[in-house]
Image (cartoon, helix red, strand yellow):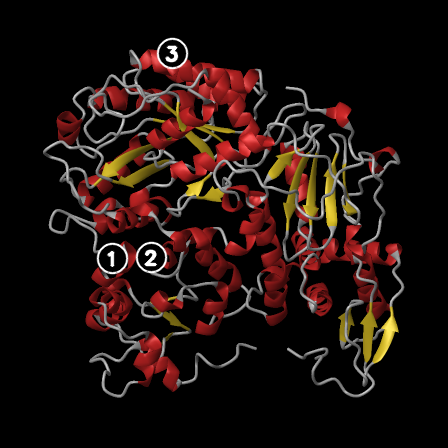
Amino acid sequence: MDLMEKLSILTDSAKYDVACTSSGSNRSGIKGAIGSACLPGICHSFAADGRCISLLKVLMTNICIYDCQYCVNRRSNDVPRATFTPDELASLTMEFYRRNYIEGLFLSSGVMQSPDTSMERMCRVLMLLRTKYRFNGYIHAKAIPGCSVELVQRLGTLCDRLSINIELPSEKSLNILAPDKTKENIIKPMSIIRDTLTQNKQELAVYRHASAFAPAGQSTQMIIGATPDTDWQILRLSESLYKKYSLKRVFYSAYIPVGNHSLLPKDQPPPLLREHRLYQADWLLRFYGFKAGELLDDKQPSLDPLLDPKCNWALGHLETFPVEVNSADKELLLRVPGIGPQSAMRILTARRAGLLSFDDLKKIGVVMKRAAYFITCKGKMFPGTRLTHSFIYENLTADTRRNSKGLPFSPETEQLSFFSIPSVPMLSTVNSRGGDGEWQKPSM
Amino acid sequence: MAETFHVTNAPFGEVVYQYDDSFEGLLTAVFDSYRGKQTPIGIVGQQHQKRLDAQYVNIETDNAKAERVINGINRVMGGNAYEKVWTGFLSCNPDKGNIIYKYIRFGMKKGYRIHQLLTHRWVMDMDKLAKPVGRESSLMIEFIRFSCMEGGVYYGKIEPENHVISLMMPFFVDRFNSQPFIIHDSRHQIAGVYDTREWFIRSAEGLTMPDYSEDEMQYRALWKRFYNTIAIKERINPGLRRQHMPKKYWRHITEMTMTDNAPPTALPSDISRAQIGDRFVRASPYLQDRSSVQISEEALYLPTGGQTPTI
């Protein structure tokens, strides 16, 4: 089998893995070696599905003794199988890297004879890259559930990010769909990585030349929509993973029908919107100081498809608003829809030089389309807005509702129309009539 | 805030400074305006279409004066401001002279506080000038594709709107420090060259390159295959791809131009067969890079075949 064919097979088997980030490591080049790592990560290309290509994402082998029903590489599935030799894969990575196609290697593997066999082979590739080829770029490696402690620790010293897939959001689902994997098998290496990371941090503080263990931390991923687990369960799980195992990222992957188990959904489009909402909620957990319990609860277990989770939270907590932009603290600013960590910082900086107006906020980069309903500037609300649930809900969801019904008019035609004036005054119309002039006034 | 000048309402006979398109020239103009206690209504480069009602003053570039302005910016406004001025200067915006002048004058009055005045017009103008340059430079770092040429030199071609090469070079020099490479900006006809010892920026007039190396086409085909396989059919989303990877850059991105397995039939038009050791001339005023790289006689030659990176 030639390299081209192998690459096709092993890329095809790896494409459902989500994580393709090269973030978290910051390392400058070493004289005589090739490669560096950049803290925010670098995407080098974007595939036809719009997902970024940062790393060469392949499996070591797609031969697998496990029979996980959601996985395309399960042993009962009749697909072509292939295995890279360590040298093949290492030199391919180098050639791609030298041409600036990729930022590094993402290496996962099927289970060949035992988890340890596959892991050892992965270690060999990474070892080759790091020593023979002197590759100093980014490597993301997947540990295989059930492998030995020593191999996890060895892999960790060779790669930047280490991850173990938690696969499904609940133990029950895991038992049904992945009979060969157990919760302990997954959680155990996770806690080993966490403990080694903490230990390594101390070592690095004491000994300058201690070798770094997975400097970009660990991450995990789970499949969304293959099992009946709710968003509430998923989000609670993510929250505890971030807290207990100090993960850097949890990735969500909309299930694409590849299996034929009776319990798996068939002929359904992948739940992309749900995946998107979960990512939004995930960001709220990590960067905005939200807790899972604030976004969802037992009574409302799934995220609203019409509204993003932050707007949804704000609508449920109107007593918090309006927020005075010129005096609110950072935590409160971050609660306002349309203000993110970056614009919050910029507000804090800019208001030291003078009071901010709505016009200033727009210049700073606040998304006024959402923020306008929830803030005051110098004590005044945005002209034409009302702080009521129905008004804000109507306005925030106007575009989405119109599109989902497939009505054939765009915002432009709506402004001209005499007969389709909505029951609630739309912000766009208020604006075009001129408001009370606050918006138009130049800031100078 | 009183405006010191405004180009459109300038009274008849006002002064316009014209500099020689170099960074030092622009800073000399700034210096002269301070020294002469004169407020020009504009600072323009050589491409400027002259106005009939204005009086043009030719600025003679003086590195000592430029250095004093640089020190002044660093001392009064801080290093961030200087970075911004430099990045903004690399822009292709024809109005950059005025924007930078206003920003420096305003900043010399305000000091460090200029970094808080995010909504001030001149600060915003400066941001709008500098930000796209930084953004384009990171896009180019993402999307530039190198080809291995005979002799082991890696060649990458880009067509950016701004002069981003000098922002890209330090990144790749750090990353590929044992690999000689050339970044060729075919729009502005300049090239960044790294020969594994030092880097410099040259005019690309008459740049000639060797043939592609033997296995170049094979790796392009492998990469193209990887690119086509990694996409998930059920999630195809061309709009999202275009958003992240603007179509105007596709021309020089390997996986977007080449059909699977088929090597391009001809070399890019402006690279003809090579004479290694071709000598470049120092021409464009944009080439004066800040990094005080000493260009030795030796470095003026392209790396020769003997310098294949060893693995």
Residue that carries the numbered disc 3 in the rendered image: A150
Residue A259 at x, y percent in the picture: 19, 32
Secondary element type, mark 2: loop
Q: Is residue A393 left or right of residue A356?
A: left
- Along the viewing direction, whichever of A62 and A180 lies nearer the viewer: A62
- Along the viewing direction, whichever of A354 and B234 lies nearer the viewer: B234
Disc marking residue A335: 2
Residue A409 at x, y percent in the picture: 28, 75
Residue that carries the numbered disc 1 in the rendered image: A313
- Along the viewing direction, whichever of B143 and A278 lies nearer the viewer: B143
Secondary element type, mark 3: helix
- Amino acid type, callout 2: Arg
Residue B179 at x, y percent in the picture: 68, 29
Point 76% across, 74% down: residue: B42
- Amino acid type, callout 3: Glu
- Amino acid type, callout 1: Trp
Give the letter of the chain under mark 2.
Answer: A
Discs 3/2, front: 3
